[in-house]
Structures are given as structure tokens and as C-alpha cells.
Image (cartoon, rainbow, N blue to C red):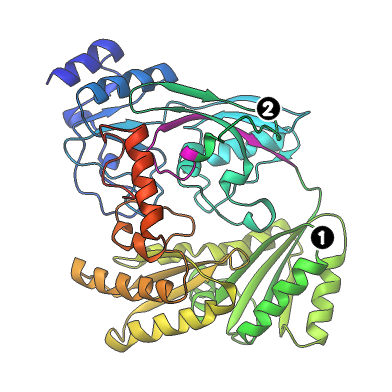
Amino acid sequence: MKLLESLRNLLGDDVVLTGEHIPEKARSDASRTGRQLPMAYIRPRTVEEVSTTLRLCNSFRNPVVVQGGLTGLAGGANPDDQSIVIAMELLTGIQEIDTVAGTMTVMCGTVLEVAQQAAEVHGFRLPIDLGARGSCHIGGNLATNAGGIRVISSGMTRNNVLGLEAVLADGTVVSSLNRMEKNNCGYDLKQLFIGSEGTLGIITRAVIKLEPLPTHQVTALCALDGFDAVLTLLSQARKGVTGLSAFELMWGPFFRFSSRAIGVRTFETDCPFAVIIEQSGETTCMEELLGRMLEEEVISDALIAKSEAERDRFWLIREGLALTEFPDLIEFDVSLPMTVHDRYVTEVSAALNENLPDIHISAFGHVADGNIHLCVSAGTIDNHLKGWIADIVYDGVRKYQGSISAEHGIGTLKRAYLSYSRNVAEINLMRSIKRTLDPNGILNPGKII
């Protein structure tokens, strides 16, 4: 094929992989819904090679799919057999850490945890953090506008980006590596690419804000008897805890399942809800809050981590790694007004249990930012049943005017439900932006819209 021949001539056989040399992982992201290997697998080493690849693919009108750490759950990185995959795994490295301005300039293929560790060496914390930190890429975090556990204090990924560089469909490199907090020179172009899931351009570098590394951390695990108590605790924590950095809710069934799966004992009696609260700072306000909440019977019990190991055990319960052992696990990531969270979980669980009595449903989430994760398993299930489950989950989101995707993106798996959370005018505007930046429709076609 002439396109492959041109790519090999310009990039070399070690960059352009085909046939048996394409790795099996290229079939799918972590949703495990992809089935086909791409026509070719490109591993660029420089931004210029990304540009060359896109310029050629655009001239041949050949679809391109970007792949990073493949931790996504929406099918956003799944190729077909006519696609060219651009894998960002070699485009790595921390280019600069400005200790005066508190910024990091980083290549998009860098693993999040690597960037976090580099920041810590210089006394800073990278505000972006999520469970897949050991394998997800910075570029993927930006492309999906990842959330995670620090949104309550630091906001979504887009809130922590000062500038970025992206390559357009025709190979044009738009380098807007701004390092200033204040810069109102026209449109904020970086926001076009953050959250666009590789449909408008390929992000290659970014300038990310850093925070001073906290010198002290307090982590508490609280037991609560009702959802109203959860909301009261959150309200009081926002008001009374300086440096509140996490507020994670686990519904009772998930908390019990995850605790037992990893062999961690916590409270003497079962609780309907469990919350992890974390504070970064030197003050004693966490202990004061918990004491007052116990007196007022907002919480029924509380444990404060006495060591880093105990803190890690609290978080290990929340990460729920044992869920991956369920066959055909379906993971939903939705956002709703906080006051309806428990009502939504109760209604969806009842609807699913009515027809699938052996179904497993785990609910947990960041809550303080509106995000709930629902993990559903009913044994080995076919696509029809998966669609029925998704209909119930997303019908509830539409009922309460929520978002079908809080932090994982739309990809292909949620595309049919986009209108549940976006109106016609918004979707039409998205289409117009897509046509303007990618007139030949080569960038991650079929994703989002």
C-alpha cells in the first residue's frame, strides 16, 4: 500500500510496525471491547514524526487512532483494521520543572506516576491523580480531561494545564506552551484539545501547574448510617477542614466486598456508607471535626490512619481491585447532583436486581464533585444484555439531568447516549468544530460524535 510505503520511507521500519509485529494490546483499551488490530502501528519518537504521520494519513484520507496507556473504559482508543494507530509510548520525558513558577513541561507519553515522582523530587505535587497512575499517560489524561481523587481540591485535569502543544489532522504543529497563569490573548486554544479524546488533534506536550508537596497528611475512614449524614459530613468538612484534599464515598455492599477481598478489617459492625476523608496540612482540624461529628451522631465510627501503611490500606479498599476478577464487568462513570446520589443508586440497583437477581453491583465515587462509579457484573453476558443494563443506568442519569460521563470520556460505548446529557445545539456545535479542525474526518473517527 502506498501510504505504508511512504510512512516507512520517511519514518523507518523500526517506527512503522505491521503484520505480526503489531502488539496484541493495540486491539482495545481497558474496556476490552476492541476486536481488530490496526493496519499499522506507528511509534513516533519526536513531535516531528507525529506531524509527518498525520500529514501523510490526511493526504490519503486514512483514519488515525491515538493510543496511550490504554486505561480508558469508553472504547476511545479502539481501532479497526483500516486504521493507523499512533502509539505515544516513546514520546516521553520531563522537559523542565520550573521550581520558581511551580510548573512542569512534560511529553504526552510520560506515565502519570513517573511525572508525579519527578515533581516530588523537587518538593512539588502533581495535582492530577487517579487509580491508573502506574500505566496511564499524561496525554491520555489531557485528552479525556481525567478527574480522579483530587478534584475536590485541584479541579479536573483542564484546571491544572497552563499550555500545551498539539498536532492537527494536516500535520500542523500548534505549539502553545504558555507558562503564565494570566494570558487572555484571544481564544484559549488548549481547551479545544483537552477532553476531545483525540478527535481534534494529538496532544504532544503540556505545561502543568504544580502544588507544594504537603508536609503532613491526615487520612480518616468514617462509618455512616445514612446518606443525609454523608452530605452533612461533606458540608462540615468543606467548612472546617483546611486543606481538604479527598472525600471518597463507598456504598455498603462495595465497602464490605472490597474489604473482605483484600482481607482488611475496619469497623466492628457493618455500615451502610463509608467515607475516606483526607487533609493535607499541619493543622489538627480533622481530629476536631471527627470528634464533633461523633458527638452529633453524624458518623457512627471513625479510624484515623496511624501510618502510611494504614493509609494505603484505606485507599486499597476504595480502589476495589478485586472487582476485576468478575467476568464481563461493566464499569459506568456518571455524574449527578449530590443530593440525588443515593436515590439514583437505589433506583438503578432495584431495576437491575428485578430481572437479574444474581447481579453484583458496586457503587462508589468521589461524590464531592458529583461523580459516581457503578460496577456491574451478571456473569457472562451478551451484547443485548449489556445494552439493557446501560439503558437502565443512563435512563437514570437523564432523569436527574446528570452526565453520562464524569471523567472517562464518551468514546464509542457512550456515543448513543450523548443526547442524554447534551442538547442538539451543543452536539451540532461539536460537529462544526470537528469539521473545521479535521475536514477529512481522519482523527479517531466514530468517537464521541
In the foreground, 101 or 245: 101
Is residue 202 highlighted in magenta? yes
Magenta stretch bounds? 192-211
Figure quadrant of residue 263 = bottom right
For this orientation, the residue located farthest to the front is 425
Give above or below for 443 relative to 165. below
The percent position of residue 131, horizontal first and vertical second, equals 53, 54
Residue furthest left in the image: 1
Amino acid type at mark 2: Ile
- Would you place residue 73 above or below residue 441 in this image? below
Q: Position of residue 9 (x, y in %)?
A: 23, 11
* Residue highlighted by disc 2: 97
**Residue at 67% across / 37% down in the picture?**
209
Residues 29 and 268: in front is 29
Q: Is residue 146 magenta?
A: no
Q: Residues within 10 Å of mark 1 (few under 14, many from 20)?
A: some
**Distance from Cα at disc 1 to Cα at disc 2:** 27 Å
Q: Quadrant of the N terminus?
A: top left
- At x 28%, y 39%, the residue is 26
| Element type at mark 1 | loop
Labelled disc at residue 162: none
Is residue 197 at least partly visible in the picture? yes
- Mark before the other along the chain sequence, 1 or 2: 2
Q: Does residue 180 appear to the left or right of 41 in the view shown? A: right
Q: Which mark is residue 242?
A: 1
| Farthest top residue in view | 9
Res. 137 in view: no
Where is residue 179? Give x, y as percent.
67, 28
Is residue 319 toward the left or the right of residue 79 in the image? right
Task: Give the amino acid type for the residue marked by disc 1 in the picture.
Answer: Thr
